[in-house]
Amino acid sequence: MAGRPRQFDRDEALDRAMRLFWERGYEGTSVGDLAETLGIGKPSLYAAFGCKEQLFYDALDLYERTYGCISPDELDGFATAREAIESTLSRNAETAVDPHTPRGCFIVLSAAVGPPQDVEVRANLTRRRQASLEHFERRIERGIADGDVPAGTDARAVASFYATVINGIAIQARDGAPRELLDAIVDGAMAAWDAVCARKTS
C-alpha cells in the first residue's frame, strides 16, 4: 500500500516564503522561486496563499509577529523613553546578524524601489515603517509627559533620527558588518540623545 501523501503545512511554507522574500526582496523573488522553495506546484501555491503579493504581505505579518518590529507595549515596558529606544536599537543589532535568519530587517530591505506595477507593495512597506516611527514618537511624547524627556522636545524629529539609525543598522548588517560594529553604532546614537532631544518644536 502506498504511503499517505505528506500533509501540506501552511505555517511551515509561510516561514520558508518569508525567509526567501527576506533574502531576495519582493521583486527579486519569482513565483517559480517560491513554488520551488515551498516544495509545491504553482497551482497549489495560488490555492494556499492567493497571489504573490498576498503571500508577501502574509510573510511580512509573520515577520512582525515572530521577529518583531517596534511594539508599543514593549516600549511602554521601560521606565524611560531613552531606555525604551536604546533597548530597541540593541535588539535590532542583535537580530540583524542572527546566523539563523537572513541579515538585516526584512521590512527595511524589501522593495524600497521597484517597477510602477509594484507601487502598492512599496506603499505597504512604507506604512509599516511609518508605524514603527509613530510608535517611537508616542513613546517620546510619553517621556515628555513623564518628565524624562525635556519639555518642548520635537518628538517627531527624535523618533525620525532613531528610526533612521535602525534602517542603517539593517543595511550595515546586510553588507556584512559584525555585531561589534552594530553595537558601536547603537552606542554612538545613544550618546547623541541629549543633543537630539535639544531640538525643540517650532
Image: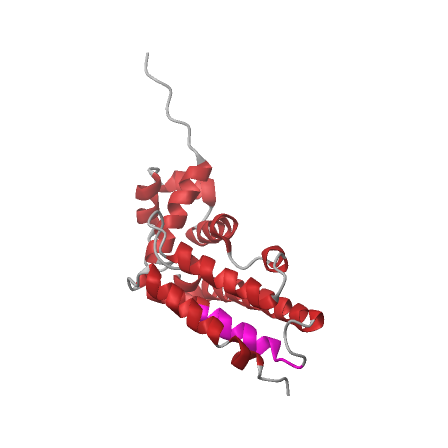
Q: Position of residue 51 (x, y in %)?
A: 44, 50
Q: Is residue 143 above or below residue 50?
A: below
> Which is the main secondary structure of the residues drawn in magenta?
helix
Screen quadrant of the N terminus: top left
Q: In this orientation, which residue lies closer to the viewer: 102 or 183? A: 183
Q: Position of residue 102 (x, y in %)?
A: 34, 53
Q: Residue at x 64, y 78 (%)?
A: 150
Residue 32 part of the magenta-drawn span: no
Q: Residue at x 38, y 68 (%)?
A: 184
Asked whether the viewer can see residue 105, the reply is: no
Please indicate whether residue 160 sits to the left or right of residue 6 in the image.
right
Q: Which residues are magenta?
A: 152-165
Q: Position of residue 36 (x, y in %)?
A: 30, 42
Residue occupying the far left of the picture: 176
In terms of image quadrants, where is residue 103? bottom left
Q: Residue at x 42, y 73 (%)?
A: 188
Q: Position of residue 14 (x, y in %)?
A: 43, 43
Asked whether the viewer can see residue 183, the reply is: yes
Residue occupying the far bottom of the picture: 202
Residue occupying the far top of the picture: 1
Colour mode of the rendering: secondary structure
Screen quadrant of the C terminus: bottom right
Counting labels gives 0
Q: Is residue 87 above or below residue 8?
A: below
Q: In this orientation, which residue lies closer to the viewer: 59 or 1? A: 59
Q: In this orientation, which residue lies closer to the viewer: 185 or 58? A: 185
